Each structure stands twice: as C-alpha cells, then as structure tokens.
Image (tube, rainbow, N blue to C red):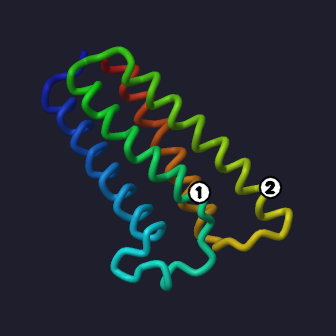
C-alpha cells in the first residue's frame, strides 16, 4: 500500500496527462483554435483513439483515487487499445497512408506512459 501523497501525485499526473491528451486530440479533430493547419498529415483514427484513451485516463484516475479494483483493468484496456492503434498505424504507413514521423514517437511515449501507470496502479491499489 502506498501513502496518500504518492497516490495523489500519481492521480494528479494522470489527470494532467488526460486533460492534455483530450485537449490536443479534440483540438485537431474539431479544428479548435485553427490548430489543424499546424499538424500536417495527422491520422484521424489515431486522434480518435487518443481522445478515447484520454477520457479513460480520467475514469482510471477516479478509480485509482478511490482504490477501486477496476482502475487497473481499464488502464490495461487503454494500453491494449493504443497498441492495437499502433499496429493499425503501421499498416496505414506501409500501405502508403500519409502521416507525420512524430506520430510514431508520440504513440510510443503514450503506450509506455500507459503501461507504466497500469503497473503503478496494480502495484499500489
């Protein structure tokens, strides 16, 4: 069992990352603040998956804060969803689809972040 301070730090970090993910994904998808033009060849299904995962992160943060067992499983589902999307991105790229190289790095980071936080939640809930 972790102390309350560590639990709050994990939760706040997850909420901040969730809000950033939701903001960026929705801004490009819905072209808020004319941000779409600066994104180049974005991949719509990747943005939709990231938006979905951002919402899942908020649910996980609540579940983790309340010590609910399902928080780990939702976080694991988010990781699997991201890995699936990464596989689809691979197919998209190799069938000639347009994309930005930075998307690969961002997806790798998000998958690692999600797996690390799934482990933290499992180890501390």
Q: Residue at x 45, y 36 (%)?
A: 116
Give the image quarter of residue 99.
bottom right
Q: Which mark is residue 104?
A: none
Q: Position of residue 65 (x, y in %)?
A: 22, 27
Name the mark on residue 46.
Answer: 1
Residue farthest along the right direction in this orientation = 95
Mark 1 closeness class: few <14, some 14–19, many ≥20 residues within 10 Å: some
- Identify the residue at image location x=34%, y=80%: 33
**Which residue carries the number 2 mark?**
91
Q: Position of residue 97 (x, y in %)?
A: 77, 69
Image location of residue 109, percent across then percent down: 52, 53
Which structural element holds mark 2?
Answer: helix
Q: Position of residue 15 (x, y in %)?
A: 27, 45
Q: Answer above or below: position of 47 versus 124.
A: below
Q: Mark 1 to mark 2: distance in Å? A: 12 Å
In this figure, what is the number of numbered marks? 2
Residue at the spot 52% in from the left edge and 78% down from the top edge: 39
**Closest to the observer, 2 or 80:** 80
């Amino acid at each position: 069992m972790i102390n309350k301070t560590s639990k709050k730090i994990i939760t706040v970090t997850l909420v901040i990352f969730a809000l950033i993910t939701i903001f960026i994904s929705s801004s490009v998808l819905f072209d808020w603040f004319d941000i779409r033009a600066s994104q180049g060849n974005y991949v719509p299904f990747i943005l939709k998956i990231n938006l979905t995962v951002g919402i899942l992160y908020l649910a996980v943060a609540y579940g983790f804060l309340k010590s609910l067992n399902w928080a780990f499983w939702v976080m694991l589902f988010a990781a699997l969803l991201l890995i699936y999307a990464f596989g689809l991105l691979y197919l998209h790229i190799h069938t000639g689809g347009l994309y930005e190289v930075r998307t690969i790095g961002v997806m790798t980071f998000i998958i690692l972040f999600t797996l690390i936080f799934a482990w933290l939640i499992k180890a501390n809930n």
